[in-house]
Amino acid sequence: MTDKRTRTLEEKKERLIRHFISSKTLKTEKVIRAFKEVPRELFLPNSLRDNAYNDTPLPIGNGQTISAPHMCVIMAEILDLEIGMKVLEIGTGSGYHAALIAEIVAPSDEKTSGHVFSIERVKKLSEFARKNIEQAKFSDRVTVIHGDGTLGYPEQAPYDRILVTAAGPKIPEPLIDQLKNGGKLVIPIGGVYFFQTLILLTKDLEGKITKEKRGGVSFVPLIGEHGH
Ligand code: SAM
């Protein structure tokens, strides 16, 4: 990228951050810092990089999208992430959201055991995400797995936090089972493309589950054994 293109992107990113702070979308210092640190442009196909800081989802191939920046930020704020946490993401897509979360649980300037495991069902996208994650220097903090994320990833369970970035008909049971006591899970639930609600599921220290609605959303469908 030329210096001029990089400068323009930085200005657009700063403007978006100011907008997110004034609209209370960005609330906590750790999420603001992570949003500043992670270059969304590196997670987009070359032809779309100049649009990295437009607040919209963008196509990444195979009929899938990278979520809009505000959605990634909203989910990161709801999850209440801490340094050192082990996080499972279902729906790697471009790898951007996984990197954003990793920059909070395992910041680049700290030595921690925080890690993000992210599952993608489309093989080509899992390869695209791996390449992006490597370019953006997140390979040591994000592991991409190709498979059906509705089954979770029992190999590394239990998780402190789980996020699902595609909308399912219900919360997949394996994900609830793989969440630690004291953990949080966020997932869009509803129809295919329409009438979806973001749900926050919390497991308390005794394993008791509560669910809260966190607003209307629009995601691509979660497809798989416990999906659509
Ligand atoms: N988090 C992504 C990012 O930062 O680019 C955006 C995710 S995109 C909105 C949703 C992704 O979920 C798609 O890449 C889709 O292929 C994937 N997906 C759908 N069902 C899945 C499943 N059962 N397991 C894993 N990935 C799934």
Image (spheres, helix red, strand yellow):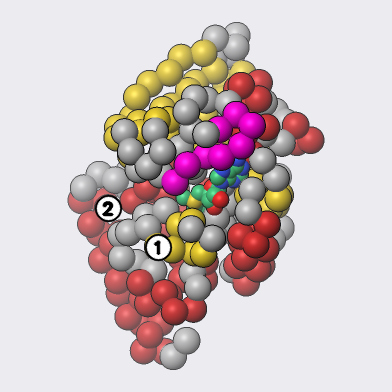
Q: Position of residue 196 (x, y in %)?
A: 35, 33
The disc at residue 193 is none
Whether residue 11 is situated above or below residue 97 in the rendered picture? below
* Residue bearing mark 1: 58
Q: Quadrant of residue 99?
A: bottom right
Q: Amino acid at mark 1?
A: Leu
Kindly check if marks 2 and 1 are in contact, taking CB atoms under 8 A apart as contact.
Answer: no
Please state the total of marks drawn on the protein image: 2
Specify whether tag 1 is near ligand 1 (CB below 8 Å): no
Q: Earlier in the sequence, mark 2 or mark 1?
A: 2
Q: Secondary structure at mark 1?
A: strand
| Magenta range | 220-227
Whole-angstrom CA distance, mark 2 to mark 1, is 19 Å
Q: Position of residue 118 (x, y in %)?
A: 64, 47
The residue sitting at 62% across, 65% down in the picture is 128
Per the image, is 223 magenta? yes
Disc 2 residue: CB within 8 Å of ligand 1: no
Q: Position of residue 68 (x, y in %)?
A: 37, 55
Residue drawn at the location 63% of the way across and 49% of the way down = 120
Q: Quick check: is 107 in the magenta stretch? A: no
Residue hosting label 2: 20
**Which secondary structure class fits the magenta region best?**
loop
Amino acid type for the residue under numbered disc 2: Phe
**Residue 11 pos. (x, y %):** 30, 74
Q: In the figure, 191 relative to 3: above or below?
A: above
Where 175 falls versus 64 (above or below)? above
Helix, strand or loop at mark 2: helix
Q: Residue at x 49, y 21 (%)?
A: 202
